Amino acid sequence: MDKQEKQLPPPIEIARLKEHFKKMYNLNEVQIGMMLVSSAQSLRTTLEGIEEYLQVEPNLAEIAKLSHSLKGLLLNMGEEEWADIARSLELSAAADRDEDYSGLLEQLKWGAKEMLLFGKS
Amino acid sequence: MKEYYQILVADDDPAQRMLLKMCLEQGGYSVMEAKNGTEAYEILDREQEVRLVITDLDMPVMNGFDLIRMVRNSDLRYRYIIVLTSSEEKESLVRALSLGADDYIAKPVMVEELLLRIESGVRLLRLEIQEELILALAKLAEYRSDETGYHLERIQHYTRILARDLAGKYPYLKISSQLAEEFARVSPLHDIGKVAIPDAILHKPGKLTAAEFEIMQTHTTIGGELLREIQSKSGSYYLQIASDVAMYHHEKYNGRGYPEGLAGEDIPVAARIVALADMYDAMTSQRCYKEPFSHEKTKNILIKERGEHLDPKMVDSFLEQEDVWLAIRDRFGD
């Protein structure tokens, strides 16, 4: 993963995300807290969904839909570079391309690791 | 004041719904949520005060496209619909707009842009409220004429089905589906000039004298000029049509009508349509001076007036759809 990490955007950080919600959406602390919980849950649900559809025989149509949702979620979080990776996943799946879907998913999971742990106790 | 306008946010992603809700509440709006198109439609059917909708396109159960189609094809009150889209989804956007969406906003949503687009929707809905006020005035004029019940609703429905039928059969008339709807919307204003007619003439149970009839005839010019005056200040196309209908709905195809003796295609098409709608309704309704005629008797009169009082195309359309006219008459009976 080391070589890939150099090419990948920096991982999503909660501190940066808090600042994004405050600056772009003028949210207060309580609202930011609620958005972090909700965004983390949506990220988990979406990434787990993609992983499930990659089992045995990949369901590319469903992966394309989930990647589309993931892209929107990442854009709302201000993570445009990660949203681009989700978009690549979406476009490849929608076009039924031969692609390293598991690899792309692992990249996304790596980038979102701090968020994926957020709120899970 | 903004809380009058309730907004429905439809998106399957809870985080997206939450974010939009927070942004809209900052703008002073009240927000309801739906996680798919089916839930959204149920809310719109139940909650008449929800006038603005922001919807994602890709949702489970029922997607945004089907939601837009259902809302536009139903009898529900008009809702201003904004779609959420990604910047590269041009085809989806075109499809949503062609189905009847009013506007779009690209993700990621900027708060300022979101609130400005909502305000555009609010301005459009305010125009509809003004229209409702105008129709309320038309209803007052009808009450004064003792034409109670569903007269105006029937006129609107008759006008709508005539206009839509003619639009399909005679492209040279240039009646789009939107224009057909405008004709129906303004039709209740056809007799607004009657507010200026003295009671003694308006409610006379017997035949009017020549002098009285001359006064009664002025309801066309009074109504037409009143609407034209408002139209000249507002530039509203809707009021231009209304003015033509009020002014010319008593013109006759053979040129022997009033107020100007226009003939044939010189009579604005909206006025020719409303002329038949009004004639049918007047004949099949109770008036202070007569009992209602049967549908068959009315139909025979309309056939006799084909090419004389009435445009032949209008009469032919009525004959082809008389079952629908009967159904409207029954459904909106007084």
Image (cartoon, coloured by chain):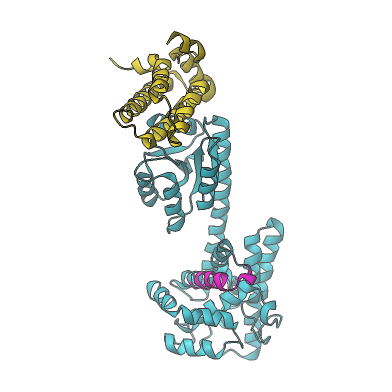
Chain colours: A yellow, B cyan
Q: Is residue B171 magenta?
A: yes
Residue B254, x across and y down, in percent? 66, 87
| Farthest residue, direction front | A98
Q: On the rendered image, what quadrant is the C terminus of chain B found in?
A: bottom left
Which residue does the image show at 36% across and 39% down from the upper left? B35
Q: Name the foreground residue: B107 vs B266.
A: B107
Which residue does the image show at 71% across and 80% down from the upper left? B260
Residue B332, x across and y down, in percent? 40, 72
Which residue does the image show at 54% across and 30% down from the upper left? B111
Is residue B298 at least partly visible in the picture? yes
Q: Which residues are magenta?
A: B158-174
Q: Is residue B217 left or right of residue A5?
A: right
Q: Name the foreground residue: B106 vs B149.
A: B106
Residue B52, x across and y down, in percent? 48, 45
Principal SS element in the magenta part? Answer: helix
Residue B141, x across and y down, in percent? 55, 70
Q: Is residue B76 left or right of residue B86?
A: left
Q: Name the foreground residue: B99 vs B295.
A: B99
Q: Is B88 situated above or below B143?
A: above
Is residue B206 at least partly visible in the picture? no
Q: Is residue B241 magenta?
A: no
Q: Is B259 situated above or below A78?
A: below
Q: Quadrant of residue A43?
A: top left
Q: How many marks?
A: 0
| Farthest residue, direction top | A2
Q: Is B295 situated above or below B8?
A: below
